[in-house]
Amino acid sequence: MLTFPVSYPVTASFSILSIGQTVRITDALGTLILYVKQKAFRLKTDVVVFADEAQTQPVYRIRGDRMMGSVKYAVSTADGRLVGTLQRQWASFLWSATYRVFDANGAELGTIRQQNPWVRVLHGLVEEIPFVGIVAQMFVNPTYVVDVPVGVTVMRLVKKASFTSRTFVIESVAQLARDTEQVVLPAVVTFALMERARA
């Protein structure tokens, strides 16, 4: 389990040069706090999040309830205790990424959404341009906001890109109660894992 409160900003760095997806998540001091190595070609999401690169200390398990549509991702601790869930709003991929965050009891805490939907549209257009699209995507970087409750922004995710990696920087905008942060931060990490390919 993570130690809360976490030192922000938190950086999730995705390697794009390996088969599958390798993610290193570090705090403001550069200390590794989470590590993920997703298997390639898995139809339904089932991801174990570790505290170390050797993958000996499981922290979370993320499982999707279906392959597509309004997928609900359950985030549990290593011993199987439900932390919370994250549900993607179906059809939001057409305009802007929007996810709803729920606690372990099913109560809605807030949303994660794209700040400017037009950036998503522009991103989709430039990636279709041969050669130019690869370079242009590094300069069309969406920003996402975490509202808890809805309308009150508490975190911001800024996507950055290079030729070798994709990075989400998770910034704290407003302080959260510890029990809320324990649900929201794993949900934000799950969001980054699911949206990396679309961001």
Image (cartoon, helix red, strand yellow):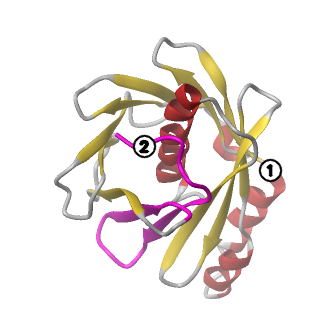
Q: Residue 27 location, x and y as percent? A: 51, 60
Type of amino acid at the residue the image marks with label 2:
Thr
On the picture, is 54 further left or further right than 110? left
Instruction: Tell me the kind of residue under disc 1.
Output: Pro
Front residue of 32/191: it is 32
Residue 179 sits inside the magenta stretch: no
| Residue at the image position 73 percent from the left and 25 percent from the top | 149
Which residue is disc 2 drawn over? 3
Q: Nearer the viewer, residue 50 or 17?
A: 50
Magenta-drawn segment:
1-28
Badge 1: residue crowd in 10 Å (few <14, some 14–19, many ≥20):
some
Figure quadrant of residue 16: bottom left
Do the residues bearing badges 2 and 1 touch, measured as CB atoms within 8 Å?
Answer: no
Q: Is residue 69 shown to the viewer in this render? A: no
Is 55 above or below relative to 44?
Answer: below
Q: Quadrant of the N terminus?
A: top left
Provide the residue designation for mark 1.
Answer: 117
User: Percent x, y for residue 53?
Assistant: 26, 64
Q: Position of residue 121 (x, y in %)?
A: 76, 58
The reply to whether residue 197 is visible in this rendering is: yes
